[in-house]
Amino acid sequence: MERTQYMTRTSIEWVRNPGEGSQGFTVNPIRFRNKQTGKVGHYCEKLSPGCKNCYASRMQKGPYLSGLEFTAENKSRGELFFDENVLQQVLRRRKPSTFFWADCTDLFGDWVPDEWIDRCAATCALTPHHRHLWLTKRAKRMREYFGHSDYRPVMVGAASKSLSALTFTLPSEDVFDARRIAWGQSWKINAWPLPNLGLGVSAEDQERADERIPDLLQTPAAMRFVSEEPLLGPISHRWAKWEPLKIGFNGQFDGLRGIHWVICGGESGPGARPMHPDWPRGLRDQCQAAGVPFFFKQWGEWLPTGQKQHYSLATLIDPPDDRTPGQPMGDAYIYRVGKKSAGRLLDGRVWDEMPEMLR
Ligand code: SF4
């Protein structure tokens, strides 16, 4: 049996609707059907250490999804398709909302044709009352896709025209040239980059930050963000490799100039790797110095000592039950308490800062 769920209210802490701050939605139009069972889920390919314990891959084993985890050999066991019903739900929602796209795959994976991405972008263009967030590990392709500022707005405009006809969605004069459309001419988008679309890259460690953030900085976007989750090591935005971009002045924190939001968090779920407290602290301090909003999503499975009062050092090192005993991690002591107990206080406070576009 196939369960059809196009738009899901998400529990991801940083996906919040503008204004009231209630939880936003995830949408996944890139889908994958198991050829043998007919069950439908998602497909992605693991790329870097942050993908090791991918929850979307694990979820596929559940009763309602494809049954095929994200492995190379599983690609031939299913077929990819684009589910337009997902777009229609977004287009039909009137209440201003925030949508996080493709949390169960990567929109810029090489298995996703440009035409599908055009249709996703067209949905964003036709819904200027919503906020949209795209996040990728394939930053180079995202830069190339959005970098074609000559013909890409024409392609997305063409996709907007066909979607609009399907749902009777009226084009916004902010985004499209209404006179040109009235005269039956091109639907070329005139607001490029799209003002309601935030583009982000995931960077779990310094190597991935050095590789992906420069591409992000060269991608035209109304809002750029970096998700440093699961954070697997310290990350400095005061670099060497990014310097040749010459974004902003040539001093400290250049790497955060042009970035509008940093999210960070530890890993949760089976096999979760711990996060040293100095890693999120370092990012927080860099963001504060650079005036960039910082969002601390969670500690994940592991909590370091000193971050929650009701876990004393003695309890962490020698737990009174059968939980994993605490263990040293550099100069810190960490203890597996589970994501819920670990919570999301960093040095005694919640860090929930949001960029202007999402407020
Ligand atoms: S890119 Fe994202 S969805 Fe794809 S395997 Fe990696 S963590 Fe999972």
Image: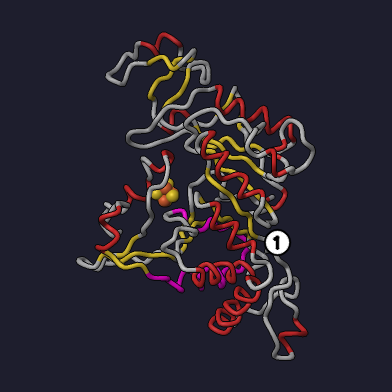
The image shows residue 285 at horizontal and vertical percentages of 67, 27
Residue at x-position 50% and y-position 49%: 137
Out of 26 and 212, give the one closest to the viewer. 212
- Answer left or right for 85 relative to 224: left
The residue lying toward the viewer, choosing from 25 and 47, is 47
Q: Is residue 274 left or right of residue 203?
A: left
Q: Residue at x 67, y 30 (%)?
A: 286
Name the amino acid, label 1.
Answer: Pro
Does 13 sit above or below residue 348? below
Question: In the current view of this chain or complex, which residue is farthest to the right?
Answer: 249
Q: Answer whether residue 300 is visible to the viewer in this image.
A: yes
Q: Residue furthest front?
A: 244
For residue 217: magenta? no
Element marked by disc 1: loop
- Say how the picture is coloured: secondary structure
Q: Which residue is mark 1?
A: 195
Magenta-drawn stretch contains 102: yes
Residue at the (53%, 22%) spot, across then down: 277
* Camera sees residue 64: no
Among the 4 quarters of the image, the one containing residue 163: bottom right
Q: Nearer the viewer, residue 74 or 218?
A: 218
* Residue at the (75%, 78%) spot, across then down: 177
